[in-house]
Image: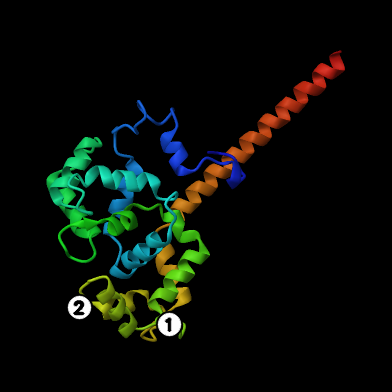
Amino acid sequence: MLCSKPSERLTAHQVLCHPWICDHGVAPDRALDPAVLSRLKQFSAMNKLKKMTLRVIAESLSEEEIAGLREMFKAMDTDNSGSITFDELKAGFRRYGSTLKDTEIRDLMVAAHVDNSGTIDYGEFIAATVHLNKLEHEEHLAAAFSYFDKDGGGYITVDELQQACKEHNMTDAFLEDIIKEVDQDNDGRIDYGEFVAMMQKGTMGLRLGRRTMRNSLNISMRNSLNISMRDHKCRCSCS
């Protein structure tokens, strides 16, 4: 999994099938990954535009990128209806070791489904639980902006946002508030820079944490290499 060359790296499916991960050939139902629950909570705090954007990005991801989340959804969707009900979500969380209260699970449920259907469909689940580092990829952000910018004018207008809401079966009563929240120059529309700033808001700490960890690992590896080289020189001098 740590191979620097993507062609030599295990795919998500191969990882899930590896003996280190599998228990008698099946990925075990152990405690729910805290990161997944954290992403659900982060998703619940996002505005509608950001939720819709994550849905658009999630739909463009490859099967390998979301393999683990797909299997989790299938495990929770016990009646194979293609959507998760409150009871299924509750049972799924319990099976994965979560101790959330019913009220907390219901709050997450309400926040995760963007079309007010009362259930969480596959696309909504992936959008709510996908790793936020997907927001760092320029091509994903550009493609998502183009989805909302229907006329290619370089801005997302209230009318275009209303059309996107209809496509996702979302109520559009507060579109002006969404525009106002993201519109930094107060021109009544959202340009690409404002769109990117909205999507990356709240993820700086995650990126900083990964960067700090990466720098620490680099320092540690350099120190280990220097010690190894000194020991080698010492052995050579002694011999």
106 sits to left or right of 141: left
- Looking at the image, is mark 1 or mark 2 earlier in the sequence? 1
For the question of whether residue 43 can be seen, the reply is no
User: Residue at point 35% right, 27% down?
Assistant: 23
Q: Amino acid at mark 1?
A: Tyr
Q: Amino acid at mark 2?
A: Ala
179 sits to left or right of 234: left
For label 2, the SS is: loop
Farthest residue, direction top: 239
Q: Position of residue 1 (x, y in %)?
A: 53, 38
* Looking at the image, residue 93 lies above or below residue 191: above
Rendered image: mark on residue 82? none
- Residue, disc 2: 173
User: Residue at point 19% right, 53% down?
Assistant: 81
**Residue 201 sits in quarter:** bottom left
Labels 1 and 2 touching (C-beta < 8 A): no
User: Residue at point 22% right, 56% down?
Assistant: 120
90 sits to left or right of 15: left
User: Residue at point 15% right, 60% down?
Assistant: 118
* Looking at the image, residue 210 lies above or below residue 196: above
Mark 1 nearby-residue class (10 Å; few <14, some 14–19, many ≥20) = many
Q: Position of residue 10 (x, y in %)?
A: 52, 40
Which one is in front, 139 or 36?
139
Q: What is the basis of the colouring in this image? A: rainbow
Which one is in front, 2 or 9?
9
- Residue, disc 1: 155
- Label 1 – label 2 distance at C-alpha: 20 Å
Mark 2 nearby-residue class (10 Å; few <14, some 14–19, many ≥20) = few
